[in-house]
Image (cartoon, rainbow, N blue to C red):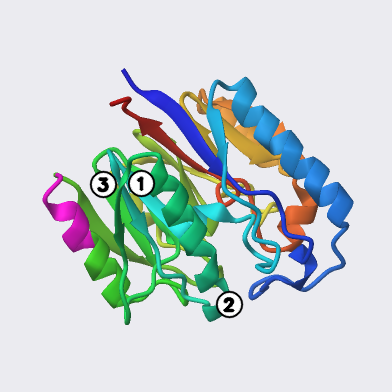
Amino acid sequence: MYDRRALVRRPSSRLADGLVTHVERQQVDLDLAVRQWEGYVEALRTAGWETIEVPLADDCPDSVFVEDTVVMYGDRAVITRPGADERKPETGPVADLLGALGYDIVSIEAPGTLDGGDVLRIGRHFYVGMSARSNADGIAQLRALLAGFGYTVTGVPIRGCLHLKSAVTALADDRVLVQPAWVERGAFADYRIVEVDPAEEHAANVLRIGDTVVSPACFPRTHERIRAAGIHVVTVDVSELQKAEGAVTCCSLVFAHRPR
């Protein structure tokens, strides 16, 4: 029997100073961002996930995007080495918390870089974005760490977006949601593909939690496509977090925990 857990981290008061690379910088309403984050966390709890809050990192503007700091499988936590130097200090408290909870802690080491937003797990397979944030050495290290546990790792080129999960996410074990402008459909030919609506460029990032996906509320046309594929959609308003180049996967790290 497994417990369902999700790491989350409250937005920094410096959220508006975070890195943006593929979106234009906009003014961020911090109070609204915090309320939206609280609504997002409540959606996870309502869906039956225990949320574990990582200590606030107020000096790290992007720290709300906690997914980028760790990759989980079984009882092991792979602490990443973010590709942006400004984000490297985010990982220490995550490692400390997961270590205190009893997880086996290993780390990506220099010169490797790896952002969790580039890591898409579907069943026993990990797809890793070959991006500006995750390099070949980081992907090779993750492959080596996973090899003894029966997982495989495939590097996937992306273009025009920050992370792999900006371009593709899982809807089910046999189905993915894809933005074909940013990743080749052929990389996911083993799955049934649902494409985002062409009018909703950033709609490919959804968070799968069991038989449901959580998606930003601003993509109704893509939601129709997902529902037509038989997938239940829960919507959340994350407009201020989107201005900081975030979305629904990056604000948590969901995983199945086996009680000891």
- Circles 1 and 2, Cβ within 8 Å, touching? The answer is no
Secondary structure beneath dot 2 equals: helix
Residue type, numbered disc 1: Met
**What range is drawn magenta here?**
143-149
Kindly identify which numbered label has been placed on residue 259. Answer: none
The quadrant the N terminus occupies is top left
Secondary structure beneath dot 3 equals: strand
Q: CA distance from mark 1 to mark 3?
A: 13 Å
Residue type, numbered disc 3: His
As drawn, 56 above or below 163: above
- Circles 1 and 3, Cβ within 8 Å, touching? The answer is no
Q: Disc 2 or disc 3, which is closer to the eye? A: 2
As drawn, 46 above or below 187: above
Q: Which residue is mark 3?
A: 125
Q: Disc 1 or disc 3, which is closer to the eye? A: 1
Name the image quarter holding residue 18.
bottom right
Q: Position of residue 102 (x, y in %)?
A: 33, 40
Near mark 2 (Cα within 10 A), the count class, few <14, some 14-19 or many ≥20, is few
Nearest to the observer: residue 168 or residue 55: 55
- Write the residue at 44% across / 68% down: 158
Q: CA distance from mark 1 to mark 2?
A: 23 Å
Does residue 106 appear to the left or right of 7 in the view shown?
Answer: left
Q: Which residue is mark 2?
A: 86
Q: CA distance from mark 2 to mark 3?
A: 30 Å
Q: Position of residue 161 (x, y in %)?
A: 56, 68
Q: Which residue is mark 1?
A: 72
- Write the residue at 74% across / 38% down: 38
- Write the residue at 61% across / 51% down: 55
Magenta-colored stretch includes residue 189: no
